[in-house]
Image (cartoon, rainbow, N blue to C red):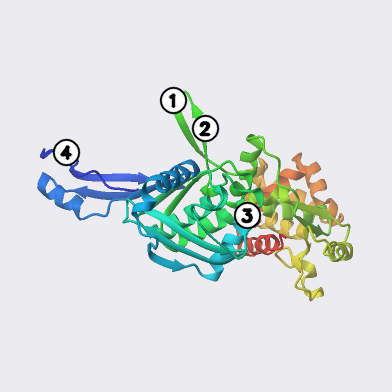
Amino acid sequence: MGGNLPIESSQSEAEFSGEYSLALRAGAPAEIVHFSRPVTWKQRQEFDASLHPLRATRLTPYAALDELAYFTQNLSPAWPSVPGDLSNLKRSHVDALRAITGYSYETVTYGQYGERDEDFPYFRVERDSRTLDAQTMSASEFWVHWVIWHLRSADENEVVLIDEPETFLAEPGHRPFVDEIARMALESGCQVIIATHSATMIRRIPAALVRQVSSTAGGALTSEVVSTEALLRALGRSPAPVSLLVFVEDEMARTVVRFLLRRFATDHVTQVDIIDSGGKDDAVRGARIARRSRQLGTVAVLDGDQRDLYDDETILFIPGTSEPEALLMDVLRSRGRDAGDRLGVTSSDLLIAIDAARFVAHQRVFEVMSGALDVPPADLIRVALTLWLEDDSIATAARRLVEQTLALFP
């Protein structure tokens, strides 16, 4: 909940008083917040005056340029040439600006003309043996500094609304810009809301923090987003290109790794190509050859029973200490009642099917069970994997595997 009820102008003893319960939903379950306001008008007035009202700052590229034009034409002659509160940005911040704008800065200095609420940002940058300020920068460069300056001056009781931060920027600057916005928000403690159509920025933000705003006859409708890739496809955007090759031993390993990616990194699934290599040696060999690529990341993910056979930090392993089929069969056997309920079969029939698959090659166990139960092999595997991840230690190891895999993105 942001902000407070306004200080009342009337002296009615009945307005905005009493006890309240407010449900804040940022997921499930909702958080219930209890608050109260004094009954008498004078007490409420004193109570409101003691609070720190929430401030909102709205940043749009067009308003920024309009303020620059107004300042240049009307105010700049009246203000001193040297502003107040001058400070040089740290090297790490300067390097971040370089990644956004493409310019190599020697120094970046920020300051302020005027007082708070009637101020105008002051920028001075040195690059390419030249000194530039807000009035001599390009629109793209000015807009980036405008946003960063406001974020640096924001506080934890402020909401900063940024409208289409990608405006004026070349596409390579989109990702570093949204990264810097996020870093500045964490540093200042302010809340940032971004309205963007940039696929790069949308992909960079966790799906849990993304909302789709749609126009309806009744007004704007805001919806939660499960997958940013699904959202971008719905908006007609091209899918993210493949950035990582994962070599695995066989089709079952491919299924397991794909399932883990969908569970723990839904928005990166389309960027990962999982290759059934036909054996552990070919998986390792394929990853080592592909590692020479300068455009794609690459890794070998082997079954858990190979864990002690390789001493190579570039090789990752599926959780557990045996091949995936054996792991999943053990889960179905130990969780027979739960598995049967989810598959729509009795636990006894499930155990009979498991027993029937004991004497076939591990690649065919789910095919044999499928015939015995009249349940598609994909359903058997899906239920087994879901039950497998209900073990906290397995889920932790699986999440770690996904994190290690995604860390190899180029």
Rendered image: mark on residue 15: 4
The kind of residue tagged 4 is Glu
Mark 1 lies on residue: 218
352 or 302, nearer to the observer? 302
Mark 4 secondary-structure assignment: loop
Mark 2 or mark 3, earlier in chain = 2
Residue 29 seen in this snapshot: no
Picture quadrant of residue 360: bottom right
Q: Residues within 10 Å of mark 2 (few under 14, many from 20)?
A: few
| Residue at the far front in the pictured view | 77
Q: Amino acid at mark 1?
A: Gly
SS at badge 2: strand
- Cα gap from disc 3 to disc 4, whole angstroms: 48 Å
Expressed as whole percent of the image width and height from the top left, the position of residue 410 reads: 72, 60
Mark 3 surroundings: few (<14), some (14-19) or many (≥20) residues within 10 A: some
Q: State the CA–CA distance, disc 1 to disc 2.
A: 11 Å
Question: Which residue is labeled 3 in the image?
Answer: 264
Give the label, 2 or 3, closer to the camera: 2
- Marks 2 and 4 sit apart, C-alpha to C-alpha, by 35 Å
- Residue 123 horizontal/vertical position (percent): 47, 59
Q: Which residue is mark 2?
A: 214
Q: Compare marks 3 and 1 and give the one earlier in the sequence.
A: 1
Q: Residue at x 73, y 63 (%)?
A: 318
State how far apart marks 2 and 3 are (Cα).
27 Å
Residue type, label 2? Ser
The disc, 2 or 4, on the residue closer to the chain's N-terminal end is 4
Residue at 52% x, 32% y is 214
